Every structure is written in C-alpha cells, then in structure tokens.
Image (spheres, helix red, strand yellow):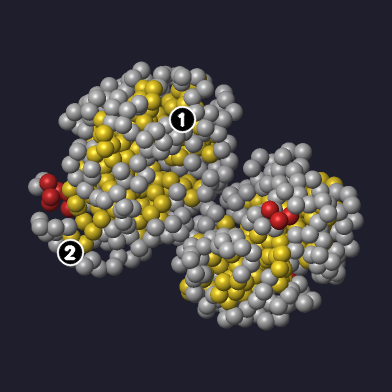
Amino acid sequence: MTRVACGLLFLVPAFLTGCSASGPSFQLWEETGGPYARNISAVLPDNRIAGTLYASAGSGEIAVSTSNGRSWAHAAPIPGGPEVHQLIQDPESPDRLFAATEAGAFVSPDRARSWTPLLVGPAGTGVRVMAIDPWSPSTVYAGTEGKGFFKSSDGGRTWNEINASPDLLLSGADVYDIGIDVTKPDIVFAAVSQYGIIRTTDRGAGWKGLTPEFSGTGSRATHLLIGKDGHGTLLYGTTSGSIMKTTNGGSSWSPSRIARDFDGILSFSVLPGTPDGLIAGTERGIIVSSDFGTSWGGTGGELPGIPTRVAIAGEGSQATLFAYGGGIGLRASGDNGVSWRGADLKLGGSTVDVLAIDPAGEHLFAATGNVCMTYTGGPSGAWSDPGPGITGGNIHSLSIDPSVPGLVYATTAAGVFVSTDNGGSWQTTPRSMQISPFLYEAHPSITTRRFMASDQGIFVSTDRGLTWNQSRPLGNRWVVRSLTFSPWNAGTIIGATSNGGVILSHDGGFNWEQARYGIPGDRVESVALDETDPDTYYAYLPDGKCFRSLNKGLEWNRYIPPWKPTNNVRIACDRRATNSVVAFVDGRHVYYSTSGGRTWIKLIDADLHASAVSLCWNAATMTLYAGARDSGVYRLPLGKRIREILGE
C-alpha cells in the first residue's frame, strides 16, 4: 500500500507552554495532514483563462487555481457555509459565476471574490443544478430540492416558477440535472426525481414526461447529456449505473450499459479530441465510450474505483481531465485518463465521519464517504493512499478486532467488510442475511463472538461471523450506536441506542432488555463504567447530559457533569478502557474522567478551529483525535497534562 508523505503540516505557537496547577493551560490541536481534499463537491474550469479552475471542498469554501490545479488560493466563501452542488460560468460575461448550493443560489460578479444570494423560490429552498442558455445568457434555469424549476430572464436578478405541466406535479419535484439543446435552445431536458427524464420545447412554459421515474431495477435518473449536434440524441444515467440512449428525442430508449451494484452515474462529459468520445463518472470510478454512449468500458487508467466526477478544461490535445469527488480528492490527467497526478494540495480537507484506533495507538482509521484511510506513526506519521472504496456507499462504522492484530471491520449498506492488513485492502465477509448493518463489533474476551446491528435489530454470531441469529426479543428494532463490554463479567453488555435509550444483556448478547426507569427512552450516545464499582454505569446523551445507574442499569438518575446543559458537548470513550472518558465542550474545553464520569478533571483549553464531527480517544497513548468537517483529522496529545495533574 502506497504511503502519502504528509506528516505534520504546521503547529501554531500556544498561548502558554507551561501547565499551571491553578488552572488549565492553553494547547493547540495538531494537524495530521489528512485525509486531505477528499470531499470535493464542485469543480469549474474557467472557459476564458487557460489553467484557471474553481473548486469547492465543502462548507461554502471556494478555492481558485491559476496553475491547472498545481496550487490553490482560497477565494471568498459563500455566505453561511453551505454545501456547493455545482459551479457554472456565464459564457458572455465570464467574470460572473453562479453557485448552486443546499442553501440556494449565489452569484459572483468578480470570479469568486464576492458572493450574493439570489432569490430562487421560497426562503430556504436548496438549488441542486443551474443552466445558462448559450444563445441568450440572460436566461438562467435553476433546478431545486423539492420545489421544481425556476427561470430568470434577467441574468438572475428575478426568478419565476416554471412548473406548468398537464400531467406532472413538478412543484414538489427534486431536479438533478438540466440540459439545453444547443441547436434548439427552446428545447430543455431535465432529470427529475419523481418523473425521470422530462422535456420542454418552449423554454419551460410546459413540460412533458419522456420516461418512467424508475427503471426495472428501481433506480432513479441522475444525469443526462445531449448530443453536440442535437438531432434528438440524448443519454441519461441512473443511480444503479445503467445508461439509456435515444436518437429520436426521447420517443424510444435503448439500454447502452447494464447496471452493476452501487455504481450509479455521477457525471457525463465529452472527451476532447474524439468525435464521439464520452467519459462518465460513477460510484465505482470512471468509464469511457468511443461511440457516444452506445457501448462503455473502463479507462485502463490508475484511478481507484471510488465515487468520481469528471470536469474537462481546454480543448483537443491541450485538454486536461479533472477527476474529483468523495474519497478521491482532485486529480488531473493530460492523456484522456491514462495517467493522473494529484491536483489538490492545500485545496481543503475531508469530512471524517467515523474514527477508530487500534489498542496500541499505532494505527488510526478514518472513514470519509466510502473510503477508509489509515494514519500511522504518531506525530510525524503519514496517511495511506485512498485505494479502492468499499462497496455500498458511506461507511457507517469501523471497529478493531481485539484478538487479531491488523484486523479491521467496516460496515456499509452492502454488508460487513474486513481488512487483514490495517486497512490496506478490504474484502466482503460472508452474509447469511440480507441486511444493511450500521454497527459490527467483536467481543473483547469471547474471541468467537460477533455482534451486528441494523434497523432490523441486533444479531449475534458464535462462529466469528459465519452464521447469525437475531437476539431476543425477536423482531427487536433497537438502533444500536455503541456497545460497552463489562471488564468484570463477559456476559454483561450495555448498548446505547438511537431509539430505545440503554439496553442490557446479561448472557453475552443473546437476550436484551431495555432500561426502564429514569433515563430517556430515545437517543443515547455511549455508556461508560466506573472502575471502582461494577454496579455503576454512566450514560451520555448527544447534548452532553449524563445519567447514572447504581444497580447495573436497572434504574437511572440525572447526574450533573461540570458543564452546563446549554453547552455543545462531545463525549469520547475508549472501548478497551471503559472507565476512561474525555469530554470536548464548546469546541474548546477538554475534561477527563478515569471513573466513567463520577469525577472530572478540567485538563486544558484547546481551540479546534473547525467543527468536530467525530471523536476518538485512546487511553493507552492518552491522545484525543477529532474528525472535523471539511478539515480532516486533528490530534491532541494529553498525556503530559494528565500526568502532571495526577502527579505521575
């Protein structure tokens, strides 16, 4: 597995370097150097200035490159920090850019130096896609999230709803793509959630459906491409990965690609220098066609098979392909996809939704989308290359096998996947049931016992996951977020759920019961134990509230931690040291407990200049990790401070 030499990017000097006994010192989080630029949502090559690109890596951030992606500078962010779905450029006034975002549409009159919101639809309406009439650039179409279509005839200053149709209820539709026939701009096609591919022949005055909403496999139309010479040639792709083609304007359709599992179509582009060449981005990498979509094949290139979109800059032999998306970052190719180079240095960081670490703290695993990357080597460590993504969409959970070094489990909608080489490669595990798990755990002391949780309940295996049975009560629907295993009794397991509060098993996971008294019966994040008393449990809710049980989870009472109910609190527990807990409060204050929460120590103030999405605490190395939104992973070593306070 190739290693990326990222290491530590920078350390800003702390306000105070000493640790005072009278109060917490100031300390800063350290960047790990990744996972970097893995969730790029939009790329726009400038159609007038060669080598200039615009890109968004999340939270409304816009970056500009004038070197064909070799270096980047940050431009003005879009107000409110929304996710950016698309960037487009006015062909007549190239200084003017439009952004379609989850918070609506925005316009920049000065190539991303400033942004102004546009009033498309009711307040709060998300805009997923925009298109400009090439013959009349003052005409702009916007496809929304749940409000159908809007149109501007004055360059975006004012907008009108254009959802008229004799048989389609477009006012509540989700619009995924818009294509304008360049030979006859009165004709506009769109991919719409409720109705598949639809068409207007009068610039939006009325719409007609051309396909069913779903294909025979139950997939939805996502993207479309109109032939460069018009003449009724059109392709559309689906969430399943199938592609359909028409040569008569949609009167009839023929399949040009049969779907594979989880390889939905994410983009269509015309390949430069080839009369009928196309390239499509899919959930499993990129595919190409030399006959305008009649047949498809792989590129033979070196990109990993993970969700990828493609944008193209320039023309002919001077053109550059840019592949981007969740997990791949941004890569550039000057030879139509045969070879690729990185093009995302300093572009932005990824959002890390799930973190896990091995017992010794040597390998940290971070999931971003369907990609799991590994950080190895402590303060001067490096992140692994992304490699192929895991089938089934976003990774829901990561867990470490406590008895086999290097064994890691991941879950997606497609099942449970296992790596025997610390995340270097992944294989699917045998499945005796067709469920979509969001949690998989190995028992820390019963080496053959495995647990799996889905929205269909809790399942237990006694043969290392080869066969499974549902735990009792049969038909249970508890949505389990985490499991805590008692260090005193192998049969005692405590579950934190999203819909049933705390659940308990006293026979190793075969039978469960719900805690009945004193604790809310809905969402609980995690449960910690008091190392001095096997009967005492602490349960933490998402808002930082704490409940305590003194009789092994039967009865609970509110327990007051040192922070306020109004604080923003994230809790991190070490599954291998069930008494060791860290609380990160308001993105700054760090508290520590060695008793599951009975007593707390205020350690330090450490500002994380990003929004923490996930936390991971390793008690052995006394290091806290935070997965931040659009910023990758940060680490905070706390051992020195803890030893000072505890007098060790």
Give the amino acid at mark 2. Answer: Thr
Give the amino acid at mark 1. Answer: Trp
Tell me, for residue 88, which label it has, or none: none
Tell me, for residue 17, which label it has, or none: 2
| Left/right of residue 334 with respect to residue 646 in the rendered view | right
Of labels 2 and 1, the one closer to you: 1
| Left/right of residue 78 with respect to residue 153 in the rendered view | left
Q: Residue at x 37, y 44 (%)?
A: 542
Q: Residues within 10 Å of mark 1 (few under 14, many from 20)?
A: many
Q: Residue at x 50, y 19 (%)?
A: 474
Q: Earlier in the sequence, mark 2 or mark 1?
A: 2
Q: Residue at x 87, y 60 (%)?
A: 232
Image spot of residue 203 (x, y percent)? 81, 67
User: Eyeballing the image, is 346 above or below 472?
Assistant: below
Q: Residue at x 27, y 21 (%)?
A: 489
* Residue bearing the label numbered 1: 478
